[in-house]
Image (tube, rainbow, N blue to C red):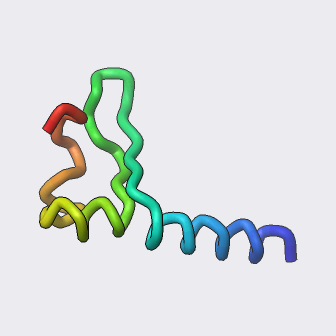
Amino acid sequence: MKDFFKDQFFKALEKNTIFSRADVQGNLIFVSDKLCQISGYSKKELIGKKHSI
């Protein structure tokens, strides 16, 4: 049950919050749906690119 709520929380966060994660080299490893919507880029276009894009 705890994992269910955790998963639901992260799904809601991804859809409604602009955020990304980068590795130590500054390459994007995760981008939220909202970030893609606002930027006009797809996840495929952003993942692996430098965070400074």
- Residue 39 lies, in percent from the top left, at 18, 60
Name the quadrant containing residue 31. Answer: bottom left
**Residue at x 18%, y 66% (from the top left corner):** 42
Instruction: Tell me: residue 18, above or below residue 14.
Output: above
Q: Nearer the viewer, residue 12 or 6?
A: 12
Whether residue 9 sits left or right of residue 50 in the image: it is right
Counting from the top left corner in percent of width and height, residue 24 is at: 37, 22
Residue 46 coordinates in the image, percent (x, y): 19, 52
**Quadrant where the image shows the N terminus:** bottom right
Q: Is residue 23 left or right of residue 39?
A: right
Look at 40% across and 51% down and name the residue there: 19
On screen, residue 25 above or below 20 = above
Residue sitting at the far right: 1
Q: Quadrant of residue 6?
A: bottom right
The residue that appears at 37% across and 51% down in the rendered structure is 30
- Judge from the rendering whether residue 52 lies leftward or rightward of residue 12; answer left or right: left
Q: Residue at x 38, y 47 (%)?
A: 20
Quarter of the image containing the C terminus?
top left
50, above or below 13, in the image: above
> Percent x, y for residue 9?
66, 69
Give the residue furthest to the top. Answer: 25
